[in-house]
Image (cartoon, rainbow, N blue to C red):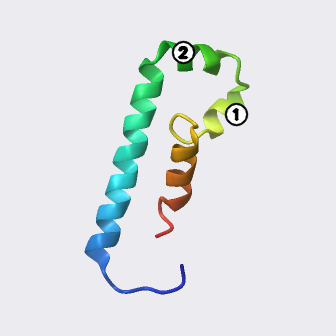
Amino acid sequence: MARHTGNVDVVENLQKALEAFLADHYKAAHEDPNWIEEAKDMAPEVRESNVACGCDDCLAAGQLLGRI
């Protein structure tokens, strides 16, 4: 996004919300037996490259994080 409105508070709140969302998904995934079982079959570099739990929502949030 090339247009900047100067609304720093909104941008900061959006970034905090994205960080909280990703942290929540990461925690939930690492407590989910199904995700843990699926993650065992992932190559270490794939597992490490995933954003939070690796779902589509986490990937979208990861793309926005730091870019708004």
C-alpha separation, residue under disc 1 versus residue under disc 2? 17 Å
x, y percent for residue 32: 46, 18
Element marked by disc 1: helix
Instruction: Identify the image quadrant of the N terminus.
Output: bottom right
Q: Tell me which residue sits at (51%, 67%) in the image.
A: 67
In this rendering, the label closer to the viewer, 1 or 2? 2
Q: Tell me which residue sits at (63%, 18%) in the image.
A: 38
Mark with earlier residue (1, 2): 2
Q: Tell me which residue sits at (52%, 46%) in the image.
A: 57
Q: Which quadrant of the structure image shows residue 17?
A: bottom left
Q: Which mark is residue 20?
A: none
Which residue ends up furthest to the front in the rendered image? 56
Please say if 2 is above or below 17.
Answer: below
Which amino acid, by three-letter code, is at mark 1? Val
x, y percent for residue 54: 58, 37
x, y percent for residue 37: 60, 13
Q: Which mark is residue 46?
A: 1
Please rate how many residues cluster around mark 2, counting C-alpha atoms within 10 Å: few if below 14, some from 14 to 19, many from 20: few
Q: Quickly name the residue at label 2.
A: 34
Please say if 54 is above or below 31.
Answer: below
Element marked by disc 2: helix
Towards the viewer: 58 or 44? 58
Q: How many marks?
A: 2
Q: Which quadrant of the structure image shows residue 28?
A: top left
Please say if 59 is above or below 52.
Answer: below
Q: Tell me which residue sits at (71%, 33%) in the image.
A: 45
53 with respect to 12 (left or right)? right
Dot 1 and dot 2 residues touching (CB under 8 Å): no
Which amino acid, by three-letter code, is at mark 2? Asn
8 with respect to 56 (left or right)? left
x, y percent for residue 27: 40, 29
Towards the viewer: 1 or 57? 57
